[in-house]
Amino acid sequence: MDGTLPTARVTLETRPHIVVIGNEKGGSGKSTAAMHVIVGLLREGYRVGAVDLDARQATLTRYLEARAVTAAKRGVSLPLPALRAVHASKAETRQAADAEDEAALREAIAGLARETEFIIIDCPGADTVLARRAHALADTLITPINDSFVDFSMLAIVDPDDRRVVRPSVYAELVWEARKDRFACDRGRLDWIVMRNRLGAREARNQRDVGATLEELAKRIGFRTVRGFGERVIFRELYLQGLTLMDLKEAGIGGSLSMSHVAARQEVRSLLAAIRKGPPGDVWDLKRAGAKRPPLAPRSGEA
């Protein structure tokens, strides 16, 4: 990444806040996290754009298509973001493909920036030019990982005997490069949140070991951790209808909320609160937020 992204000429006070959902490993819950962040922001009254960088698999795109169908069938109002799907270039040479990919992302971001306050980018589960470019644009990066040392290996190499962090791994190095490019663009900083998904209801030894090792790594390479989504059937059920846990009332499910539903909704609120909090003294302070770029905070009268 060389830092020559289109937003380099856009000030922090005027451009939308960009939230990137990224992890090179597939199956970590990126699209589910992206959808819940999108709907959570929409329901707080913000204008939201969404970019699907995994247009071949199109998980986020299909999620939003199903959402529109559900709204029409049930005759209910479900907020939708402005969506852009970016397809990877099929150019014959690497150089030409990289240039086309960057131009496509530039066009998607520029189009959404004129009408939104927040842009959520859902990245593919692979190391691609598009994913790297997106990471270099991020104000907030959310990395969902399944709570195991298998997924942890994307962040760091761990000593198998004492669970000590030996060194950062490939994805952590990618984020480090993205941070440098993000700063080179407009002196902005990337707030990195690692989201621990599929946590068990009871704390097992492996869960404690992963948590302790994660906190050690967080201090070394600079990210925050948040408890993510549990392994709940409700997430898979809602996907087919394009719904999120923030839509249960409109969808007619609100009257039969189980304790699992309530717990899952709290997980979503915790994630939004983590984004809202931001790193101390960074992107959310008054000087850098500015009147034209409101911080992620509940609107007047909201809890």
Image: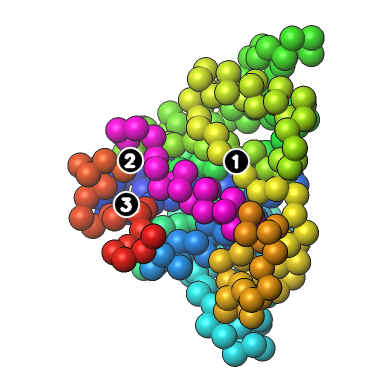
Judged from the image, the secondary structure of the residue bearing numbered disc 1 is strand
Q: Quadrant of the C terminus?
A: bottom left
Apparent side of residue 124 relative to residue 82 in the rendered image (left or right):
right
Q: What whole-number distance in Å separates the C-alpha atoms at marks 1 and 3?
A: 22 Å
Q: What whole-number distance in Å separates the C-alpha atoms at marks 3 and 2?
A: 8 Å
Judged from the image, the secondary structure of the residue bearing numbered disc 2 is loop
In-front residue for pair 300/163: 300
In-front residue for pair 86/196: 196
Measuring from the top left, give residue 43's x and y in whole percent. Answer: 45, 68
Q: Which of the 4 image quarters holds residue 14? A: bottom left
Judged from the image, the secondary structure of the residue bearing numbered disc 3 is loop
Measuring from the top left, give residue 208's x and y in whole percent. Answer: 70, 25
For the residue carrying disc 2, how many other residues have a C-alpha within 10 Å: few (<14), some (14-19), or many (20+)?
A: many
Q: Residue at x 58, y 71 (%)?
A: 247
Residue 283, which numbered label?
2
**Marks 2 and 1, the one that precedes in the sequence:** 1
